[in-house]
């Protein structure tokens, strides 16, 4: 894949691009028109900590066209490091923004991943909210290597422009880096739990909690099994604090 369209700032060595929703949609539109594989990652502090330890994941983020600042930890860290970002670009909100733009532009979306039936329900929600959006296909599948060829064929046969992959990080991002070119899709985005939110499987934090930057705490309370993953967050904060100066 080619290089990123805008220079990255780095948080603990991991690239982050200072782009807005609007600019992201602009890039997606350009890439759909041009064709060829383009990867977008939605980077939160858990990604940063994982990529510092996982060489393959780090390499994928390095070659991604856009590493979007997802999660309040990223925006706080950037501000603290003297490189404030203009916007936080969250995966699930981006999916809705893409669906809205896709309805206008005719981009064909494919929803890959999540538990069986969830992508289908998420597609139903998007079709209802964004009249005229083309969902070219949905499929749960799995990131296991033996499923790779079948999934690539499905996505290609659907004539996909934008492939949304919900296998969680880093599996979704590794999958996109490895397979996107053969799917024929112009853009591949790892979207984490976005289909679960859209389908209503997992409740989204109320807007006021999101606004004050405590969605991570809400997620921890609603999905307590996340505590292990969130253990890296204090470490992330400490490393950022120590990095200054
Ligand atoms: N998932 C999946 N197959 C797998 C592992 C995960 O479809 O082998 C899905 C899972 O059902 C969920 C999403 O990947 O919809 C990951 O959600 P999570 O909220 O963990 O994402 P993150 O926090 O990484 O953004």
Image (spheres, rainbow, N blue to C red):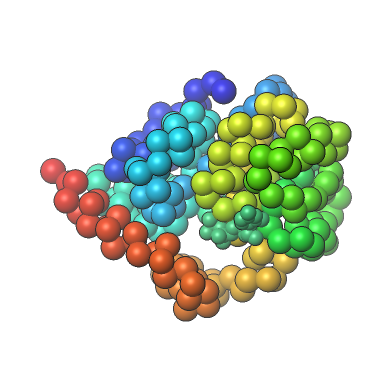
Task: Say left or right for 1 vs 200.
Answer: left
Point out residue 215 in the picture as x, y percentages from the top left corner: 47, 69
Q: Residue at x 76, y 60 (%)?
A: 116
**Which quadrant of the view contains residue 96?**
bottom right
Q: Can residue 54 be seen?
A: yes
Quarter of the image where one finds residue 236: bottom left
Vertical arrangement, residue 42 with respect to residue 198, above or below: above
View quadrant of ligand 1? bottom right
The N terminus - image quarter: top right
Residue, far left: 245
User: Is 19 placed left or right of 237 in the picture?
Assistant: right
- Residue 33 in percent (x, y) is at 72, 26
Image quarter (top left, top right, bottom left or bottom right) of the C terminus: top left
Instruction: Return the x and y of residue 131 as percentages of the image width and height.
Output: 84, 55
Q: Residue at x 49, y 72 (%)?
A: 225
Determine if residue 17 is in view.
Answer: no
Query: Which residue sits furthest front?
Result: 146
Relative depth, front residue between 58 and 238: 58
Residue at (40% x, 36% y) in the render: 55
- Left or right of 150, for residue 225: left
Q: Residue at x 66, y 32 (%)?
A: 179
């Amino acid at each position: 894949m080619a290089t990123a369209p805008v220079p990255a700032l780095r948080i603990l060595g991991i690239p982050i691009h200072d782009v807005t929703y609007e600019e992201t949609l602009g890039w997606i539109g350009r890439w759909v028109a041009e064709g060829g594989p383009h990867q977008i990652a939605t980077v939160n502090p858990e990604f940063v900590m994982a990529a510092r330890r996982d060489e393959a994941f780090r390499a994928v983020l390095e070659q991604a066209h856009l590493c979007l600042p997802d999660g309040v930890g990223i925006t706080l860290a950037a501000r603290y490091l003297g490189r404030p970002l203009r916007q936080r670009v969250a995966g699930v909100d981006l999916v809705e923004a893409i669906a809205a733009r896709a309805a206008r532009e005719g981009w064909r979306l494919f929803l890959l991943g999540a538990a069986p039936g969830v992508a289908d329900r998420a597609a139903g929600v998007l079709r209802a909210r964004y009249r005229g959006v083309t969902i070219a296909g949905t499929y749960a599948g799995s990131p296991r290597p033996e499923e790779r060829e079948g999934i690539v064929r499905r996505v290609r046969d659907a004539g996909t422009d934008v492939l949304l992959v919900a296998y969680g990080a880093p599996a979704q991002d590794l999958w996109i880096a490895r397979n996107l070119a053969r799917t024929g899709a112009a853009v591949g985005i790892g979207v984490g739990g976005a289909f679960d939110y859209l389908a209503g499987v997992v409740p989204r934090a109320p807007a006021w909690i999101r606004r004050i930057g405590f969605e991570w705490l809400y997620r921890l309370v609603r999905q307590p099994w996340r505590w292990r993953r969130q253990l890296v967050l204090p470490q992330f904060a400490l490393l950022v604090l120590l990095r200054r100066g």
